[in-house]
Amino acid sequence: MIAVARPFAEIYRFRELVLMLVQRDLKVRYKRSVLGMFWTLLNPLLQMVVYTLVFSTIMKVGVPRFPVFLLAGLLPWTLISVAAIGSSVSLINNQGLIRKVAVPQAVYPLAVVGSKVVDLVLSLVPLAVIAALLGRPPGLHWLFVPVAMLLVTLFSVGLALLFSSLTVFFRDMRHLIDILFQVWFYLTPVLYPQDFLDKLPYPWVKTFLLLNPAAYVVRCFQVPIYEGRFPDATTVGLATLSTAGMLVLGFTVFLRSEERHIHYF
Amino acid sequence: MPGRLDFDDVGMCFRIHREKVDTLKEAVIGRFRHLRTVDEFWALRGVTFRVQPGESVGIIGANGSGKSTLLKIAAGILKATEGKVAVEGRIAPMIELAAGFDPDLTGRDNVFLNGVLMGHTRREMAAKFDHIVDFAELQEFIDMPVKNYSSGMYARLGFAIAADVEPEILIIDEVLAVGDERFQQKCVERIREIKKSGCTIFYVSHAMESVAELCDRVLVMAHGALAFDGPAEAAIARYRELQGLVPRSLAHGQA
């Protein structure tokens, strides 16, 4: 038991380092940019406009208050994909440090996830404004959002650890990850509600799509923000299960190969 | 006072892939081919020594003799392939001063970043901050990005941080190579102070006078093995003898 807990104790000991790496990332990212943080907010809003135009106005998905529905799913999805794609090169980019300083290597992907979580928290503000304007004012059910944040963050941590380690051994994971996340985006109910799956003519397709762990995590945002209620126990349970699975997978792969990374840079 | 270090028959083997399998395609297509072309290179083998708390130990040897590998194993960056390594006490996990500097951050931010990389809290670093800046003599430049620093300023800040974070085992690798004579003298004074406080010191250098001056005991490395372990003068003599006997072309390439 103690042997299992040791790497986690080490990571916890360097928690301030993770915070400082997040700060470093934000500082370097917004240096000499006039609009600074606004770029972070502008990106999902622009996507919202385009997707609403295409899927609600042109293709008529038939979801009322589509921008609210879209953003509620798009923001957590963006965290998952950007954190995983960004951290896939985090070990390679920090190899200079890894070769010279003995700190738990998990701090590097964790810092990437951390800085993307900051982006997500910031973009909740315009989301709340848009939701209020379109008749879905934030209420008591928003109390679930912090729980959903925790779930999506831990889910992203699992993915980030997994991909950052794999990319060290196989450099073309970078390209594979880009494609994987494009496909995964359309398979996750972000542009369409999950109950659309019930109308699918082929039950095996539905079964396959329901195995998508990201869907449950994203749903934990859509239910309180768009539907205006607390998610039921099944939704929360499945999301927790998905998150736990991803965390275990990520940590297992990462900690098992941590010592070998340095030989593959 | 902890600060003990034990190497027992330690070896470090690097696998050198002739055809590096870096991509999925190569892993699939060359599944069996790549198994043939792995070369083993022992950067360190059969190294046994023991350092007592408070000792200051010099490590000398030609380029590629295994000094860096030895330090990396001691600091915990590399895991030894064979043998046993036991470290008691907090070792500075950094084998090179200023290794953690981010060129885009200011000197101030880098002091904190490096302190935290070495396992300190930000609060601890805040308490040491003024002292570090004073020692590095960088008061006017501390809020400037370190990419604008000269290499001497860089090294001064790096040494000032390392000297002030109070590890129980301090690794000093080629610190005195940069910096002017006056600052070098100041560093030597500081190392003497640290030595007096009972800290275990690992000192790596090609400057034999400073090794003789600072170390009671010197390890001589040659071709990944320990060639000599003993008092400074005898060690330096042995090192010079090895240098004279081994032509440069035979030395290993591994740094």
Image (spheres, helix red, strand yellow):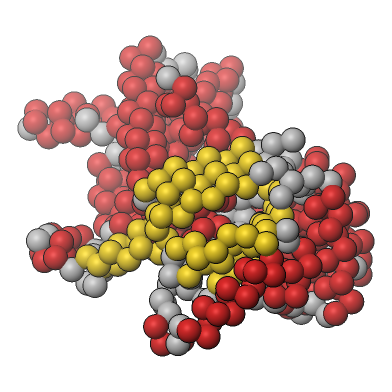
Q: Nearer the viewer, residue A210 or A170?
A: A170
Instruction: Identify the residue at the far top of this view.
Output: A233
Give the left or right position of residue A163, taking residue A95 as reference.
left
Does the rendering let one see residue A188? yes
Q: Nearer the viewer, residue A130 or B40?
A: B40
Instruction: Identify the residue at the far front of this view.
Output: B234
Numbered label tally: 0
Give the left or right position of residue A12, taking residue B168 as reference.
left
What residue is at 49 percent from the left and 62 percent from the top?
A: B226
What residue is at 67 percent from the left and 62 percent from the top?
A: B231
What residue is at 32 percent from the left and 66 percent from the top?
A: B41
Q: Nearer the viewer, residue A219 or B39?
A: B39
> Residue A149's x, y, as percent?
51, 31
> Residue B143's x, y, as percent?
83, 65
Residue A12, relative to residue A28: is it above or below? Answer: above
User: Which quadrant would residue B107 be assigned to in this image?
Assistant: bottom right
Residue B143, relative to residue B237: is it above or below? Answer: above
User: Which quadrant would residue A172 be assigned to in this image?
Assistant: bottom left
Image quadrant in which the N terminus of chain B is located? top right
Q: Nearer the viewer, residue A40 or A3?
A: A3
> Residue A168's x, y, as percent?
35, 57
What residue is at 41 percent from the left and 76 percent from the top?
A: B252
Residue A244, relative to residue B227: is it above or below? Answer: above
Does the rendering let one see residue B119? no
Give the left or right position of residue B140, taking residue B64 as reference.
right
> Residue A178's x, y, as percent?
32, 57
